Amino acid sequence: MTSRVTLISPATSRSLREARFDDGSPLDTRGAALAKAAAGTLPAADRVVASPTVRCRETASALGLAALDQTELGALDMGRWRGRTLEEVSTWEPEAVSRWLSAPAIAPPGGESVLALCERVAIWLDAASGVTGRTLAVVEPEIVRAVVVTVLRAPSAAFWRLDVPPLTAAHISGRSGRWNLRLGEALGTRRADTED
């Protein structure tokens, strides 16, 4: 039994453009338009899920997808840093930021660590490997990073070395917990010869 998961990163929002830890802002006009233009270009799916954030739900809607919120795919909990930029929290709490960026087991004050996020995503991936068919998941960039780290069995510190552009797809396929990975497809560029 082969499972296929296509992870779609959200369109741009004000917080994404400003490199701000998610503050619940909606998609910006350009991001919504680009997502709408990509509607209909995604592969058919047996299941459609989304991170329960505003920008992921709005991206799914703009793509014409009726996605169910998947709490296990929720954004990294940034605690009291939510809504702030990295520059702001680096000014206010430089030692805490330094510890957070250098040790994946360290969480932002009141938040969740990268290690905990990767563990949460690994549990979701394990369940997904037992489901036949394709799942489309509109998820926050940090979820895509955690999936890549988990699938490649990379050290959790590799999380910080992965860039996930808006409205791109990462595809994983496999069975029994063994996944193959294809990254970086811009939505709307899918060709017939790349169908899996």
Image (cartoon, rainbow, N blue to C red):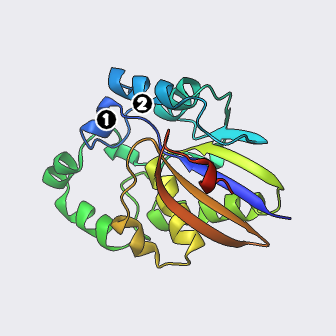
Q: Is residue 54 visible?
A: no
If the image is split into quadrants, where does the N terminus sit?
bottom right
- The quadrant in which residue 121 appears is bottom right
Residue in the foreground of this view, choosing between 52 and 184: 184
- The quadrant in which residue 98 appears is bottom left
If the image is split into quadrants, where does the C terminus sit?
bottom right
Instruction: State the residue at coordinates (36%, 58%).
Output: 163
- The location of residue 35, given as percent across then percent down, is 47, 29
- Look at mark 1 in the image and give the residue it sits on: 15
Q: Amino acid at mark 2?
A: Gly
Instruction: State the residue at coordinates (41%, 23%).
Output: 33
Do the residues under discs 1 and 2 have CB atoms within 8 angstroms? yes
Secondary structure type for disc 1: helix
- The location of residue 149, given as percent across then percent down, is 51, 70
From this view, report whether residue 30 is shown above or below residue 4.
above
Q: Is residue 74 visible?
A: yes
Q: Residues within 10 Å of mark 1 (few under 14, many from 20)?
A: many
Could you give the CA–CA distance between mark 1 and mark 2, rounded to whole angstroms?
8 Å
- The location of residue 55, given as percent across then percent down, is 46, 32
Residue 24: give its label.
2
